[in-house]
Amino acid sequence: MTTGAQHVTDPTVQLASLSKWFGQKVAVSDIECSFGPGVTGLLGPNGAGKTTLLRLMTGVLVPSSGSLSIHGENPRANPDIYCRIGLVPEDEAVYNHLTARQFIRWSADLTHVGDAAIAVERAIRAVALENAADRRLATFSKGMRQRAKVASALVHDPDVLFLDEPLNGADPVQRAALIDLFVRLGAEGRTVIVSSHVLGEVERMAGRVIAMVDGRLAAAGPVAAIRDAMSDIPRKIRIESTDPRALATALLTAPFVTGIAIEANVLHVQSAEPVQFAYMLPEAARAAAVRLTRVDPEDDSLESVFRYLVDGR
């Protein structure tokens, strides 16, 4: 973990020894960190405890121990705080019989927005739903429902946003637009906390990462620091080519290769230096007169990365 990086100098959200357990199951264990203006990625594999942590921070769940505050207040003790926060939950929290416009207006009414009609139209424009705003949510794709949920969370102009896997189901164009929106909101000085299990997504929108595994804080700091911590993890690469056996022969004595296996005409290579290996692989293929057709990481999962960060040092 990057020393001291779990805290910021100007926090809007603070967690102190926060834990949550359900019976014998510990979902979140002793989380100590803070969040401030800008976009922070809450990163971790599925089941890491991200959703439970977000529900604790928004007051949906009561902590088993520890404390939390938003703008210095516990949201469960001071309901007025809810007018300053927005939540996009991971689950399908929409009313399918409503149109998108009605759903967003319902959220505006719940948070007592003064000029609700103007606020609703502003939120609809923010997520580019103008052409579908009067369609029922039951007719929306998952990506469009995600955009409606984001608009609902933005309609009362909150200064703290909690977004739980907000890009799930969005197509590439929708994802890019939502990422641009979150970056813009962070640049405006809002505190934006985005949960994701996809490192590449977080890297595109967040300058800072809080990483979790098994309910614990695994790493904290700038995205670049997390990348550096990952750099010496042995990685497995899956390679498809026109002649896997010839390529395997060429790679056997190559630098950066620590293991090779062939399975069903697919080459599985392990390298302790994946970046350097990526540079030398095309040269090895050319020397063996082999054409590469596909190259994919096999263990680029956050779970393997974070377990290394927690247990491997």
Image (spheres, helix red, strand yellow):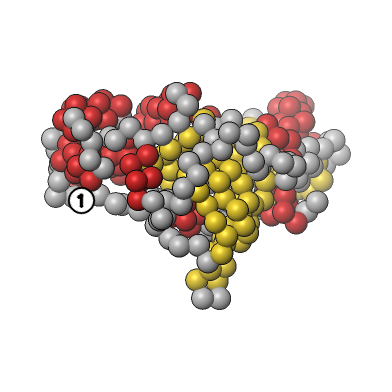
Identity, as a three-letter code, of the amino acid under mark 1: Tyr
Against 61, is 264 above or below? Answer: above
Residue shown at the point (86%, 39%) measured from the top left: 253
Q: Is residue 102 visible?
A: yes
Left or right of 117 in this view: 92: right
Which one is in front, 154 or 274? 154
x, y percent for residue 307: 69, 54
The residue tagged 1 is 95
Q: Residue 299: image x %, image y %?
A: 64, 48
Q: Horizontally, is 253 left or right of 236 in the view? A: right
Q: Quadrant of residue 173?
A: top left
Nearest the viewer among 62 and 96 is 62
Residue 58's spot in the image, x, y percent?
42, 51
Q: Where does residue 133 sit, x and y in percent of width and height?
A: 17, 33
Residue lying at 33% horizontally and 42% vertically, measured from the top left: 83
Q: Which residue occupies 38% across, 45% down?
A: 81
Query: Is residue 297 in view from this perspective?
Result: no
Q: Quadrant of residue 123?
A: top left
